[in-house]
Image: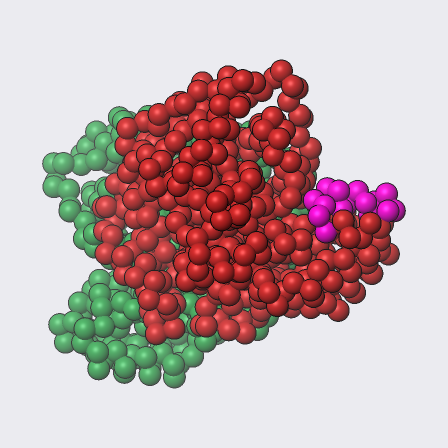
Chain colours: A green, B red
Amino acid sequence: MTGELNQLGLNRIVRHIRDGRASCAEVAEVFVSRIRARESTVGAFESFDEEEVLESARRLDGMPDAGPLRGAPIGVKDVIDMRGHTAAWGSPIYRGRMPHGDASCVALCRAAGGNLFGKTVTTEFAYFSPGRTVNPHNPEHTPGGSSMGSAAAVADGMLPFAFGTQTAASVTRPAAYCGVIGYKASWGSFDLQGICGLAPSLDTLGFFCREIEDIPLMRSVLCGDRADLEPRGDGDGPRVAFVKTPHWEQADDATRNLLTKAADSLADLTPTEEVELPPGFGDLADCHNGIMAFEAARARAYEYLAHADLLSPQFRELMETGRAVTHHAYRGLKGQAAEAMNQLATLFDRHDVLLAPSATGEAPLGLGSTGNPIFSRMWTLLKVPSVTLPAGRGPAGLPLGIQLIGRLDEDNALLRDAQWIQAALNLN
Amino acid sequence: MTGELNQLGLNRIVRHIRDGRASCAEVAEVFVSRIRARESTVGAFESFDEEEVLESARRLDGMPDAGPLRGAPIGVKDVIDMRGHTAAWGSPIYRGRMPHGDASCVALCRAAGGNLFGKTVTTEFAYFSPGRTVNPHNPEHTPGGSSMGSAAAVADGMLPFAFGTQTAASVTRPAAYCGVIGYKASWGSFDLQGICGLAPSLDTLGFFCREIEDIPLMRSVLCGDRADLEPRGDGDGPRVAFVKTPHWEQADDATRNLLTKAADSLADLTPTEEVELPPGFGDLADCHNGIMAFEAARARAYEYLAHADLLSPQFRELMETGRAVTHHAYRGLKGQAAEAMNQLATLFDRHDVLLAPSATGEAPLGLGSTGNPIFSRMWTLLKVPSVTLPAGRGPAGLPLGIQLIGRLDEDNALLRDAQWIQAALNLN
């Protein structure tokens, strides 16, 4: 049984423990031994203390009412503070930085009985300069970024759940590349205290997990929303809009085939149509980039002004780009984004969920780049919730994903639709 | 001359230095000696290092191109990180907490040549439980809160400028009580990295200063907006809406007379009319309170869950209130606020600026409370910019203020109108 435990999602693990089928210690041991076996290959962790984790599990075994996450192993991206562990934010500037407490999401998980398993590798300040994690499906390929350690650890069965953050494509892309579920919340859903910010009007907390129903469970812990989804019936499918997006030509053949086939299959089961995004949406990736640069130049001003020599060339370039964006231009970009948000809201009058690519294709070969963020920028800019589902493999044998996008602040409705689509497409 | 220097605003100090009328060191010495003389009475500072400040001034004297704030003394509320100084956030939990760097606003001021003078007293986590600062006009009265040290230091001539933050009334109220200019920016104007958050959808950086034109100067440093205002001509006054607000009955006679007279005087000079706020605005203070509690219960989850015994009873109560607000109720409150924001935007089609009370009256007697936040809650909730101007004295001889409110994200337009109104009412 323990051999399968590390393939289960958060809900099932919690239920296993609650029903007495496994103790918190047994669960912890299963994941610890997987980490012991695989970490030297995958390199997902920035810090992990076996004794601490097992001790915590034993303590939780003595606390039957510890909460809805009792005994569940949880990973934390290294841009997120966790008491007793360094949080270096992927930068040599902060090597050895010991936080003064838990980030809100960590504190809330702890209070719900979660077993905080350690810190996972991040790119520098959650931007593009990679850490050492590899893709667990093929170590010569990137796992994507910035939440690279979290995506790889969940994909490899080292954790059932891990936190990431997204400012451009930092959850969606690594989830797709690693073949796990990736959820980027509606902007503003969760508190971000204790998390290193990059561009505050874009920064969002995200989850990596194995089952869709794990997402509402964690949402309930963080923001008190309901923990369960009300499943749609067989004949009650969502109205799907297949959006190729203005970047369709950048997707490879495998991705275009995957998406087109998914849309065709859905069309047999539920109202599904291809929808062209409003004119101007082709400019939103640049709009996103300008806003991100402007805000990052302020959010990480201290590091640029006091420690520029310790920044990667990529990050310095982001800072310099951001400093060159005028306040007037920034306001223009914000106006453009606000108008597009209104247009997108109108689109949701006729459709429940959008189907779009998660990434341009499989995880690219090489570890020097985290891949192309183009298929996420727009959705992050528009603040809408997104979930990426694993959907088969590409020509190199690496995972592909499909992305589902929902109405702003209607995250559980999106997840319900995603669950329906996942079953309809046999993606389980 | 040095005797007057500590009465000057930021712009004038910077110009004095630039024109060679005083060195950075001379300016620093003037403020240092004022602090030395008055700090034991006022208690505005959490940390202040005379040698560090004088050394920094001497260094700036050797850097003629240090930037637009060269040599200007700046104070920093203790919820804001400043390198080399503890930031205890007004809580015994964080006594001795040494930050890992500068908050964004501090880093940007430093890079612009500002002389960071030290940390000013805050209430616990910028909520209601007071620190030790007294009102410099009468030490038996509160200076207001939460940015109590910043307001008192500027009022007392110990600093020309200091940062505060506002989540409810933490800039407007202490500015009014201490008789200085208080500016709460449009929500989202400035980066808040390195600042202890209380309720992220409400938290805003604010300024305390002596002259309105100091505000665009600091805005230019923080977000690159233009540093100067284009003054309105004599016959080109703003269209003023006098809003008594649904809380008018809570204002004392002196405040009601002050506002009524101000409206009458303005009516002789520029289109001014009394305007009733839309129905439902009377509920916005409660709406603000519910949102603040819900968000604070997440933002300060770690402190509540790990260190409840070190929280004040007031703060514990806020946490418990917030934990009792359901996600459904919170969403309802957010919807209510969004609708009111739309209604307020409509009101600005016919008026340029709103005139309203800053507080219920003078600073109340006693140091156990920071006073009533009622006249700020609504405007903080609606994210609009606000500036409070000193406007005479009340029956106890303590300062009174008037509050001017502008369109969202049109902060410099508000400041231009405030400048016109200040001159029209002879408030200088």
| In this view, A321 is above or below A282 | below
Q: Name the residue at 17% across, 67% down.
A: A15
Q: Name the residue at 39% across, 41% down.
A: B252
x and y, in percent, of residue B206 in the image: 54, 46
Q: Would residue B253 be seen by someone viewing this image from the given angle?
A: yes
Q: What stretch of residues is rendered in magenta?
A: B6-21
| In this view, A417 is above or below A154 | above
Q: Name the residue at 39% across, 54% down.
A: A191
In front: A71, or A427?
Answer: A71
x and y, in percent, of residue B373 in the image: 40, 47
x and y, in percent, of residue B337 in the image: 33, 37
In front: B91, or B420?
Answer: B420
Residue B183 in magenta stretch: no
Q: How many marks?
A: 0
Residue B16: image quadrant is top right
Q: Is residue A180 left or right of residue B215?
A: left
Residue B19 in magenta stretch: yes
In front: A302, or B2?
Answer: B2
Q: Would residue A311 be seen by someone viewing this image from the given angle?
A: no
> Which quarter of the rendering shows the C terminus of chain B?
top right
Q: Name the residue at 51% across, 65% down.
A: B132
x and y, in percent, of residue A148 in the image: 47, 59
In front: B86, or A254?
Answer: B86
| In this view, A260 is above or below A359 | above
Can you name the residue that lies furthest to the front here? B395
